[in-house]
Image (cartoon, helix red, strand yellow):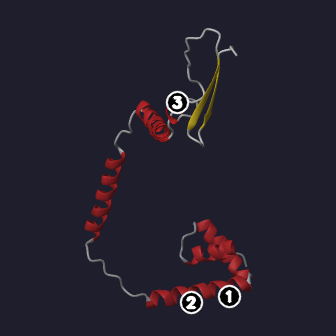
């Protein structure tokens, strides 16, 4: 027997069916032995549960209990009535937080990396050399490993 039929029998025992449905189920019960056995089992279970339930005492009156529920519903409705911030403000906050994070990262990178001119990587290679000899050629070499610069000046005269 499937669950739907058993639930229909339970509803019949609990008198939750309409008059027409109750007549149909009682006619079906009269002709089906398996349905009668299930109905008997459900009726016995219902009687056992009803006779052995412990009484539950609520510490408050019924009116007070329901008034507490009503107050909580009212409080929650009042809390949800707050207007959300305008759309522009929400959009701005969604944009401002990631941009601030990117700005902080860029500042940290700029503080950690020294410019090339200060570190000497390019400064030693491009010195401006002035001489009084008009037909002089100059060649310079910078070695960072040795920490020195060599300048070769050729005046063209032997």
Q: What x and y, as percent, mark residue 35?
A: 70, 82
Left or right of residue 108, residue 71 in this image: left
Residue drawn at 58 percent across, 67 percent down = 19
The residue under label 3 is 117
- Look at the numbered discs 3 and 1 and tell me whether their residues touch, using CB distance below 8 Å: no
Q: Nearer the viewer, residue 138 or 112?
A: 138
The residue to which callout 2 is attached is 44
Judged from the image, the secondary structure of the residue bearing numbered disc 3 is helix
Q: Nearer the viewer, residue 16 or 84?
A: 84
Q: Is residue 116 left or right of residue 33?
A: left
Q: Earlier in the sequence, mark 3 or mark 2?
A: 2
Q: Which mark is residue 46?
A: none
- Does residue 64 lie above or below 33 as drawn? above
What's the CA distance linking mark 3 and mark 2? 96 Å
Residue at point 32%, 62% (across, down): 69
Element class at badge 2: helix
Q: Nearer the viewer, mark 3 or mark 2?
A: 3
Q: Name the residue that disc number 1 marks.
A: 37
Question: Is 70 rendered above or below residue 101?
Answer: below
């Amino acid at each position: 027997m499937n669950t739907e039929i058993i639930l229909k029998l339970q509803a019949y025992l609990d008198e939750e069916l309409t008059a027409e449905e109750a007549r149909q189920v009682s006619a079906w019960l009269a002709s089906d032995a398996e349905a009668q056995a299930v109905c008997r089992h459900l009726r016995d279970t219902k009687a056992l549960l009803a006779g052995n339930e412990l009484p539950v005492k609520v510490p408050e009156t019924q009116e007070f209990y329901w008034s507490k529920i009503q107050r909580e519903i009212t409080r929650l409705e009042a809390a949800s009535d707050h207007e959300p911030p305008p759309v522009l403000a929400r959009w701005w906050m969604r944009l401002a937080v990631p941009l601030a994070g990117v700005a902080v990262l860029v500042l940290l990178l700029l503080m950690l990396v020294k410019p090339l001119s200060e570190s000497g990587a390019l400064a030693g290679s491009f010195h401006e050399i002035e001489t009084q000899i008009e037909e002089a050629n100059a060649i310079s070499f910078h070695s960072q490993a040795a920490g020195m610069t060599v300048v070769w000046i050729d005046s063209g005269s032997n």
